[in-house]
Image (cartoon, grey):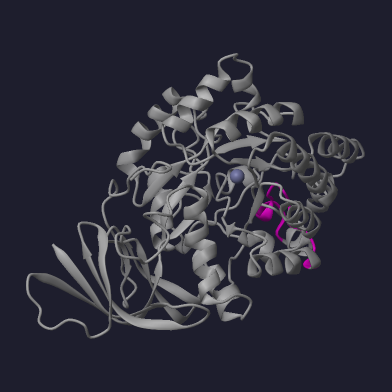
Amino acid sequence: MRTRFVNLRIPAGGDEVQEVEMVVDDGRFEEILPAGSETAAGGELWVNLRGALVLPGAIDGHVHFDDPGFTHREDFASGTAAAAAGGVTCVVDMPCTSLPPVTDTEALASKVRAIQTKAHVDFMLWGGVSGNAMADDGWRDHLVDLVESGVAAIKVYCLSGMESFTGLDYGRIRQVLAAAEELGIPVGVHAEDPTIVRELGGEIRRRGGNGPADYAASRPTLAEVAAVRELIEASRETGGRVHIVHLSSGAALDLVTKARHDGVSITAETCPHFLHFTMDDLIRQGSLLKTAPVVKSSEDRERLWRGVANREISFVTTDHAPGQWPEEKSTGSIWTDYGGVPGVETLLPYLYSEGVSAGRITLEQLVKLTAAHPARFFGVDHRKGAILEGYDADFVVFDETTRWKVAGSDLHNLNRYTPFEGHEFTGRVRATYLRGQAVFERKSDGRELFAPAGCGRWIQRGME
Ligand SMILES: [Zn+2]
């Protein structure tokens, strides 16, 4: 049935908004009209959004939903429910934290089978190339097959903590970049130099260092800078498109920006935890805020915000990667505690509150960072990431003045902790629509409604 959403505002450039009506039919925006365009209701369902701000559904380009294989950490049903509650209508799941890792089409197919009936929102899937995968001479064919099957992008690690998805040295990363360049797909890289991190980590552990500051000292800015420097050269030589995932330091951002100005095909994303927290928070929160890379200084934080505001950083992702809580975050040692934080549910409210509401970015920039730019990067900007006629009717009804306090126990992912515990945000998701259907709704009396799992679909790169 055609649905006409009335009494709403959408972003219209800068911090401007425009009062419109949206007509949705068959899951797509059929018409976006000035408010008051309707003449008489007939054969349509009307939904009055009571003056709310409507944003394009967010795309979280970097999540670890761990399914199948590590579902004690996250599960596709709980992860996508959290996404829906946070206004994220499409998640892009990493290939490395499920079993078997997505390094060939068989693994891809088995993953799709395992997760598609659980999805509350749409999903795209990263493919990957690991050290394990490159031990097989057929890795290039596997890469071609993955790209032809519609993976979102290709992920590799300079340094990985996972036995089932090991990292690659710079020479092998060059090989992957050269292959990916021919296939026209970007390569996302975890950029920390393995030699620096291993040497420093070994030294610190030998002298008994076992606190958050010791862990951070083993993964200094220098490790990220050294890896980014190598990757810039690798991209320059091969022409392969490098995307630095979860960029954490201002110095590495300086390098990325300079390289791009020099014509190197390189982009970067960062995450809310790097925009918000510093070493002081890591020392206070301990393993709760343990991530790789680690949070840096307040100067880095300010530099990253500047990069977010001026487009040096293409988009913001969460690297949503909770461990089993509290077990895996309290093993007795910072070295063995699980590294990763949840984030998919707080991405949009965080960026609205600390970005738009705090005056660091405009509403238009928020939409680019959370929707338009990731849609373009993952090759779906002809159907997702904007409120435009013909596009999938994925949108968020957002109450931009609501103040609320973040509590891990209120989140919807499996392991309910958050480094943002107790923080107050301005702006909250009231409802999330996927292809015109409400997949999440927060009622004024506090009730929360979710559509049944299985409404989310697998979206392939470039698919019509
Ligand atoms: Zn990650």
Is 86 displayed left or right of 164 in the figure?
left
Q: Is residue 254 above or below residue 239?
A: below
Report the number of numbered marks. 0
Residue at screen point 40% across, 46% down: 123
Q: Is residue 76 at all visible to an observer of this figure?
A: yes
Image coordinates of residue 354 in percent, x first then y, are 60, 74
Which one is nearer the viewer's eye here, 113 or 250?
A: 250
Image coordinates of residue 286 in percent, x first then y, are 72, 55
Outermost top residue? 137
Which one is nearer the viewer's eye here, 170 or 258?
A: 258
Image coordinates of residue 171 in percent, x first then y, are 75, 27
State which quarter of the image contains the C terminus: top left
Q: Which residues are magenta?
A: 285-298
Q: Is residue 445 above or below residue 387?
A: below
| Quarter of image, ligand 1 | top right
Outermost front residue? 263
Is 106 displayed left or right of 300 in the figure?
left
Is 183 displayed left or right of 454 in the figure?
right
Residue at screen point 59% across, 37% down: 155
Q: Is residue 226 above or below residue 51?
A: above
Residue at screen point 27% across, 56% down: 451
Q: Is residue 66 above or below residue 106?
A: below
